[in-house]
Image (tube, rainbow, N blue to C red):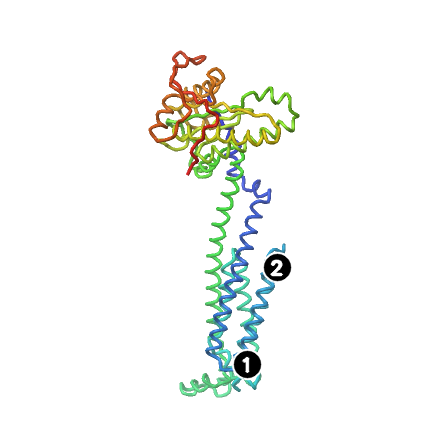
């Protein structure tokens, strides 16, 4: 017998990012990450403002420090507004606009001297010689915490533009001493005369400004490249998560993981493995469905599948396919699992335990009880993908699948809820799994099979199963 899970369209989804993105999920996830980046940048901004404020209190004498602390508070406000608007549809555009205001504010604080009553009466040209330009580079650091290279480039451009405007404005002041003007007046300068010009309080040279601009441009480019790489990594991760979520709608999580992990190297190369196969089926579902309305039947199947999937996945099983009111699960088909039989039997017992709980809920709601029959067998099978170029299927092939299906059908004849082959029960017993409820072994002849098989029957529906760790 062959149990098949169609994955032709699943493999196709791995190469259709546009189709996935069209659903909006990638955009939503990426938007959430960008919002988280804005929130983190605001918290980092708060820390930076706090450190700078403490440094100003230590460095600047009072009451001039209050002047600068007022600007620090204003700088905090300029960061708080885009933070509060980070969920807005135009959050990035709002943030970029406020970056311009940030650059302008920091430049004004650095270049413009405080009021005469608070500051030192030095020429404004001396403000360009200090190291306070480094405060502007904090804006680049803040932008680097986002997932947007555009934000980094924009911040770098805002810093360079604001500072260049200030330098050119001061350079063009009438009282500014410019080297070219002095040289034009005297023709040539000795080293001593040139030194006196350079150290004139009103002197402004452009070489330092050019150095600042070139290095800032290089720093902006390097940070933008780093953020672009981080964004590419994030996109790849989001893409993988979205594709995996899509695949998980058709196959169990372990198959989805295997598909996404091996999409480019080939998935499902045929190989032989020892696998445990579990078939489960609702007893008397046909007659029950005859008495129920279609929506009630659909709700019953949905509840059964949700409970079954949760338990199968919790035990590391692969849900190969649903079979009407039943399903087939395998254990150990994607990787070698020495204890696959024990895990499958633990899953079977957990399914029966869940049926007991579910029936208690159904009886309390005035609904009829339902029973689950399970067949379980283990042994060597061939696992892999087969098919034509246009369509392939993930397949478990072997006598083990056929026997497990027949054992599930034999539960009615034997009067039990679980019929498992002796080999599976023996392995589970060696692993220390509690096997209360299993009777003595017996030989069972299966339809269409020349040789009988030794099985054990579990009858105590109230028995419990150990929960997976």
Depth check, mark 1 against mark 2: the one in front is 2
**In percent of the image, x 55 and y 29: which residue is there?**
359
Q: Look at the numbered discs 1 and 2 and tell me whether their residues touch, using CB distance below 8 Å.
A: no
Q: Position of residue 344 (x, y in %)?
A: 42, 29
Q: Residue furthest right?
A: 293
The residue indicated by pointer 2 is: 85
**Image point (55%, 81%), residue name:** 113
| Rendered view: 151 above or below 6 | below
Q: Residues within 10 Å of mark 1 (few under 14, many from 20)?
A: some
Q: Which residue has dot 1 on it?
A: 113
Which quadrant holds residue 334?
top left
Q: Earlier in the sequence, mark 1 or mark 2?
A: 2
Q: How many marks?
A: 2
Which numbered circle lies on residue 435? none
Q: Residue 395: which quarter of the image?
A: top left
Give neighbour class at mark 2: few <14, some 14-19, many 20+ (Cα, 10 Å).
some
Farthest residue in the left direction? 430
Name the residue rendered at 46%, 67% in the picture.
215
Say whether residue 85 is left or right of residue 10: right
Q: Position of residue 127 (x, y in %)?
A: 51, 79
């Amino acid at each position: 017998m062959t149990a098949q899970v169609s994955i032709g369209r699943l493999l196709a989804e791995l190469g259709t990012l546009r189709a996935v993105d069209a659903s909006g999920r990638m955009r939503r996830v990426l938007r959430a990450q960008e919002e988280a980046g804005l929130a983190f940048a605001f918290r980092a901004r708060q820390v930076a403002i706090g450190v700078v404020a403490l440094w100003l209190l230590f460095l600047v004498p009072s009451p001039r420090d209050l002047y600068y602390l007022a600007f620090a508070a204003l700088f905090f406000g300029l960061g708080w507004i885009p933070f509060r608007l980070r969920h807005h549809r135009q959050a990035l555009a709002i943030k970029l606009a406020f970056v311009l205001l940030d650059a302008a504010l920091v430049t004004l604080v650095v270049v413009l001297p405080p009021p005469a009553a608070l500051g030192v009466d030095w020429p404004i040209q001396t403000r360009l010689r200090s190291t306070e330009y480094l405060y502007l580079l904090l804006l680049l650091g803040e932008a680097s915490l986002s997932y947007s290279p555009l934000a980094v480039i924009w911040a770098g451009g805002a810093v360079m533009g604001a500072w260049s405007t200030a330098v050119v404005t001061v350079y063009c002041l009438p009282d500014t001493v410019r080297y070219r003007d002095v040289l034009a007046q005297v023709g040539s300068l000795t080293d001593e005369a040139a030194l006196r010009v350079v150290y004139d309080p009103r002197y402004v040279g452009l070489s330092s400004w050019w150095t600042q601009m070139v290095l800032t441009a290089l720093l902006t480019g390097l940070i933008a490249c780093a953020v672009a790489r981080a964004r590419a990594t994030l996109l790849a991760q989001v893409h993988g998560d979205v594709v995996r979520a899509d695949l998980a709608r058709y196959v169990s999580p372990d198959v989805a993981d295997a598909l996404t992990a091996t999409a480019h190297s080939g998935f499902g190369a045929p190989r032989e493995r020892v696998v445990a196969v579990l078939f489960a089926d609702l007893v008397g579902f046909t007659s029950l469905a005859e008495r129920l309305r279609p929506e009630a039947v659909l709700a019953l199947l949905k509840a059964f599948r949700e409970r079954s999937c949760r338990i199968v996945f919790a035990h590391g099983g692969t849900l190969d396919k649903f079979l009407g009111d039943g399903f087939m699960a395998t254990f150990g088909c994607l990787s070698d699992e020495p204890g696959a039989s024990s895990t499958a039997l633990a899953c079977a017992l957990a399914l029966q335990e869940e049926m007991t709980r579910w029936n208690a809920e159904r009886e309390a709601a005035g609904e009829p009880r339902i029973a689950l029959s399970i067949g379980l067998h283990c042994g060597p099978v061939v696992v892999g993908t087969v098919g034509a170029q246009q369509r392939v299927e993930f397949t478990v092939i072997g006598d083990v699948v056929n026997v497990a299906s027949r054992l599930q059908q034999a539960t009615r004849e034997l009067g039990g809820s679980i019929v498992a082959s002796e080999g599976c029960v023996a392995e589970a017993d060696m692993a220390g799994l509690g096997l209360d409820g299993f009777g003595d072994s017996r030989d069972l002849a299966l339809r269409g099979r020349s040789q009988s098989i030794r099985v054990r029957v579990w009858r105590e529906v109230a028995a419990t199963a150990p929960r997976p760790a």
